[in-house]
Image (tube, rainbow, N blue to C red):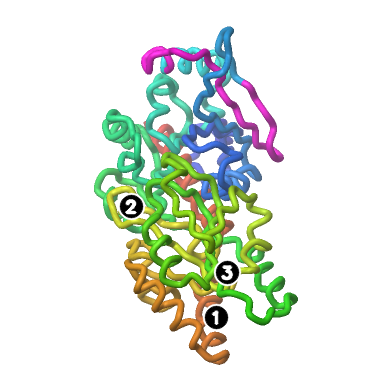
Amino acid sequence: MTLKTTPATMKSITLNQLQLPENIIVFSHLRWDFVYQRPQHLLTRFAADFKITLIEEPIFDTAGPAFYNLTPKEKNINVIVPHMPQGLSPEEVNQVQKSLLDDYMKGKQLSNYAFWYYTPMALEFSRKHMPEIVIYDCMDELSAFKFAPDSLKALEQELLSKADVVFTGGQSLYQAKKNQHANIHPFPSSIEVEHFAQTRELKALTPVQKDQPLTLGFYGVIDERFNINLIKEMADARPEWQFNLIGPVVKIDPATLPQNSNIKYLGPKSYKELPAQMASWDIALIPFMINESTRFISPTKTPEYLAAGLPVISTAIRDVVNPYGIKQLVYIGNTAEEFVAAAEQELSKSASIKQSWLKKVDSFLSQNSWSKTYQAMLKLTKQVLIDKANTSIAQ
């Protein structure tokens, strides 16, 4: 980091005198082209101030030496995928990743870099580097997920000791970790209201068909957190209703998914396609299991569904209950019977009651956006750099 200072007369660095590092290297367990979520929302905004390089987890598909494949994605955003030969042990994978990163960083000034971690596992090959600032965006409790490595918890403690600033993906996660770092801040899932408002516009232009079945929808990753039985029991109980499920099936056997005639698996859809897909829905679902893997999640889809103008029924995920359930913006239930009852209650509501609810939704959502989240994170990042600079001057 370059500081615009005058000689010893200057007592402290101000915001206007601070020159940010030009680059952020992001270590991610999620692939850029997988599901458009928190990392994409934030990093596309940080790309206005930094050059972003996101390093994904390796792909084991080469017969020759390992290599980095760099692909430009958006302005100021490049994605690196490490390609490695098959059959390597975990220790060998870490060693190869360390060599690849060391080669990539060779000749680069670490004062011109920030490291941004989504996964503590990346410490195993990046810990020797000392960038100007270390940021940990703890979006999930990864140690509770299926197939999580045994070493993840210890590595997170190491990362917390190295990080200059920590963000959490929700209030529950913040409460669980707030005593583990002196500079930790909650940033729950946010929203691009204008994007999902397209659903309202499309619904307004689409005439309601007679005898059209009630359509309930979900989008997201269908994995071990998804309550398969809840969906099946609802579909069994109301065969005249239609269930549209959008998203990739990950870490579970697709053969275990219910195959009722009124359940459609529509596969992955792009972020751009979601508003049009949702325009055919009457109600949106968050049918997650209540277990360790969902204890700290803050589903991004909650505000997105609401911005689309859709009633939402969710299981009792803590970061959905508070604030959305408490403010009566979202129905909360845990059984198929409770979900069905909530849907039927919604169907019985008058137009004026629905309009009143929508005004409450819009008022709540107006207080939040991914752009506001980015600005708050950037401010905290700058403050860390100012504090470091002033500490250096004082010494």
Provide the residue designation for mark 3: 307
| Residue 213 location, quadrant | bottom right
In terms of depth relative to the viewer, which is nearer, 295 or 185? 295
Residue 382 coordinates in the image, percent (x, y):
50, 45
Provide the residue designation for mark 2: 173
Residue 199 coordinates in the image, percent (x, y):
66, 68
Q: Is residue 235 left or right of residue 245?
A: left
- Among the two numbered marks 3 and 2 on one chain, the one whose residue lies closer to the N terminus: 2
Q: Quadrant of the C terminus?
A: top left
- Among the two numbered marks 2 and 1 on one chain, the one whose residue lies closer to the N terminus: 2
Which residue lies most toward the right here? Answer: 205
Residues in magenta?
Answer: 69-93
Provide the residue designation for mark 1: 358
CA–CA distance between discs 3 and 1? 9 Å
Q: Is residue 111 above or below residue 358?
A: above
Is disc 2 placed on a helix, strand or loop?
helix
Q: Is residue 121 above or below residue 164?
A: above
Q: Nearer the viewer, mark 2 or mark 1?
A: 1
Q: Is residue 262 above or below residue 394?
A: below
Graded by Cα atoms within 10 Å as few (under 14), some (14 to 19) or many (20 or more), the crowding at tag 3 reads many
Three-letter amino acid code at the position of disc 3: Ala
Residue depicted at x 38% and y 53%? 297
Is disc 1 placed on a helix, strand or loop?
helix
Three-letter amino acid code at the position of disc 1: Leu
